[in-house]
Each structure stands twice: as structure tokens, then as C-alpha cells.
Amino acid sequence: MSTARTKLGIGNSSICPSALAPMQDVTGLPFMSLVAERGSPDLFFTEFFRVHANSRLNPAILSSITDNPTNRPVFAQIIGENIADINRTISDLKEYPVAGIDLNMGCPAPRVYKKNVGGGLLKDPSKIQQILQSMRSMIEGNLTVKMRIGFENDQNFEEILKIISDSGVNLLSIHVRTVKGGYNSPPQYEYVDKALQFLGDDCPILVNGSIESASDACRLKDKLGVMGVMIGRAAIRNPWIFRQINEFSRGEEIFIPRRKDLYSYCMQLYKVLYNPGTDERKMVSRMKKFLNYIGSAIGDDGCFLKRLKRAVMRDELFSIFDEHLLHGERSELEIPIDSNLVSSSGVASSSGCEF
Ligand SMILES: Cc1cc2nc3c(=O)[nH]c(=O)nc-3n(C[C@H](O)[C@H](O)[C@H](O)COP(=O)(O)O)c2cc1C
């Protein structure tokens, strides 16, 4: 396992290796930098590069490889199914300092899986076999896969695991839901055990799905016997989570952010996402991709999230940040690190949002 870890670029000092999950429209260069400043995960993955007959490497996504400020490996994720197009994309990616190439076998968006790519691939193990064999022959370095446990059910799970094992894949990130399970069905961590039975030490596993805190991460790693964890949405809400995982795994005191830290994070997010000339309303919508998760970092009876969702203009947004995160003694209040305080629907209580 330690050779496999080293090959992936994971340092010896990591007790609970972690990765930031790829998230389209979220985990670009600005967000990666912002997370790295607060404590990097061991590995980063790009948003997916689309692969089709006319595809070219998307320059914005490419910048997270060429301008990677994190000092950590970045894996390029691709989504596609046509072997010639995949091979061309791999040749193009090899011109850049990628730590490896990752195949997306999990995207649940119907417009994606209906083209038999992303999560759609899970319906067709023989296609997966052809793709992985071809990718393996093209890639001397790390070939990695991110998958769900199946499309509608687990009927192809074992066959796909065997293909992954036979194809010499160097890392499997497993999101423990089916494609049809979307993002909020209960995570089925028990499937990790089956994956461990099929994959040897040469293909370590990152478990992924609804890991909310450093203690969740370290306990799951130990309980399941995987190499480490991959975290998505919780890192948007709590970009300190990777630092906290390191601290928790070493038995050190965990950094607990305060509301003023969340305020700085929100303001910095606006700044790094800002493009001169972008319409203000569009900027606020872009921020909402993040704020929908950040909004549940604090309780305030659901009001913070509810108000953020309603904001249209920048000043509205900033004054909501001010009121909830800085006003009076609020700035010193600790951000709870162990739970998602507001339900995922983010509905505020019927008492409204008087502040
Ligand atoms: C906004 C968003 C965008 C995502 N984009 C991708 C993607 O480009 N590639 C991918 O493999 N998974 C993508 N995912 C799935 C995540 O990588 C991850 O598997 C999923 O969110 C479960 O992990 P979590 O519970 O820690 O968030 C995305 C998820 C979200 C919420």
C-alpha cells in the first residue's frame, strides 16, 4: 500500500489521506486555492473535461493543472465513452503536469448518463473494459476511476470491480450510492468491503459520500479499512475540513473556525470568482453554487441560508454576511463542526427570518 500511496503522490505523514472531490462549477482553480490556504487535502481532482468528437481541453479547467498553487497532485478527470476521442484527450493532457487521469463513472445528470457516459457507463461493463484497457495502454502514470456502486442497483458491481482490478487501475474513489440514488439517498458504506475484496494493495480506495466531519472521515477510514476519504460538499461548507482531518488523525486539538472566519471565506470567494465585466446578478448566482452549502454551516434557525437564497445583488449578499457573521458578538461564535445544522432542503422555520 505504501508504494501505491507514494505513486499517487501522498506524503508519508498523512494518517488519513484525503482528496477534494471533483465538483463541476465549484472545484476550479479559485476554490482549490482557497481550500489549500486553509489546509490542503492530499489530492485534488479537476472538474471533468468533456470528451467527444469535437472536444478540446477546456482552458478554464486546464488552469487548475497549469497554475496549481497547492503543491499537491492534481488529477485530470475526463467524462466520455468514445475510445478514439478519449485517446486524443489523454495525449493532449499528457502535455501538462497531471498527476494522473481519472475516468468519471458516476455523473447522475440524465443529459449525461443518457449518452452512456458518466454514470451511464455503469450499465455497460464490456464498454468499461474496453475504455480502461485502452486508457491503461496510453497512460504510463496513474490511471484512476471514480464510480458509484451501480446505475439502478448493484448488479454489475462485482463485474466492474474485477475489470478495474484487471486493468491495473491505481486508485478507486467510490461514491457509495447508485446513480439513481442521486446525492441524498443513504450512503451505503457496506459496499466498500466488497471493493476491498476485489482490489489489491495496488489499487487503494477512497471512500466518498456524505462524509461531514473530520471525525466521520477518520472513523470511516479505520472502520472500513480504506486508504482514505474523498470529500465534496462538506468542503464547500467547511473548507478547513482537510486541516481538521490531519489534526484529528494525529490526536491534536482541532481548529474550530468562528463566524468571522466564515465571513472572510465568503468575501474571499466573491473576490476570487469575480471577473471584471461580469453582470452583478450573474456573480450572485455563481456565488449561490457555494452558498447553498455554506448557508447550512450555521444554524440561525435556517435564516442565513434562506436569506442567501433570496439575494439578487451583491450588496444584499454582503449585508447578509455582515449581519449573520460579524454583527456584535456573533463574529466570535464557533462554527459547529460535526453536523449539518440546517436540513438539506434549507427551509427556515415558520417563524420567519426576523433578525
Ligand atoms: C455541485 C457538484 C458537482 C459535481 N461534479 C462532479 C464532477 O465533475 N465529477 C465527479 O466525479 N463528481 C462530481 N460530483 C460528485 C462529487 O464528486 C461527490 O462524489 C458527491 O458530491 C458525494 O460526495 P459528498 O457527499 O462528499 O459531496 C459533483 C457533486 C456536486 C455536489
Image: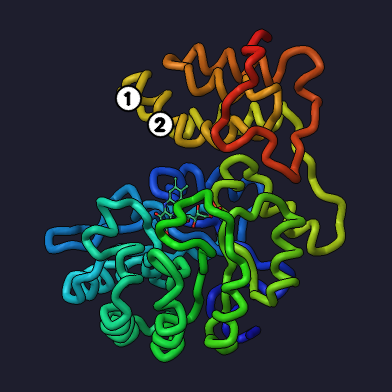
* Residue carrying label 1: 278
Quarter occupied by the N terminus: bottom right
Q: Is residue 99 visible?
A: no
Q: Around disc 2, counting alpha carbons within 10 Å, would you say few (fewer than 14), some (14 to 19), or many (20 or more)?
A: some
Where residue 29 appears, as percent x and y from the top left, is 44, 47
Where residue 37 appears, as percent x and y from the top left, is 62, 46
First of labels 1, 2 by sequence position: 1
Residue type of the residue flagged with mark 2 = Arg
Q: Around disc 1, counting alpha carbons within 10 Å, would you say few (fewer than 14), some (14 to 19), or many (20 or more)?
A: few
Quarter occupied by the C terminus: top right
The residues bearing labels 1 and 2 have C-alpha atoms spaced at a distance of: 10 Å
**Of labels 1 and 2, the one closer to you:** 2
Instruction: Classify mark 2: helix, strand or loop.
Output: helix
Where residue 14 appears, as percent x and y from the top left, is 71, 69
Identity of the residue drawn at 47% across and 42% down? 30
Disc number for residue 286: 2
Where residue 74 appears, as percent x and y from the top left, is 47, 63
Identity of the residue drawn at 55% across and 56% down? 20
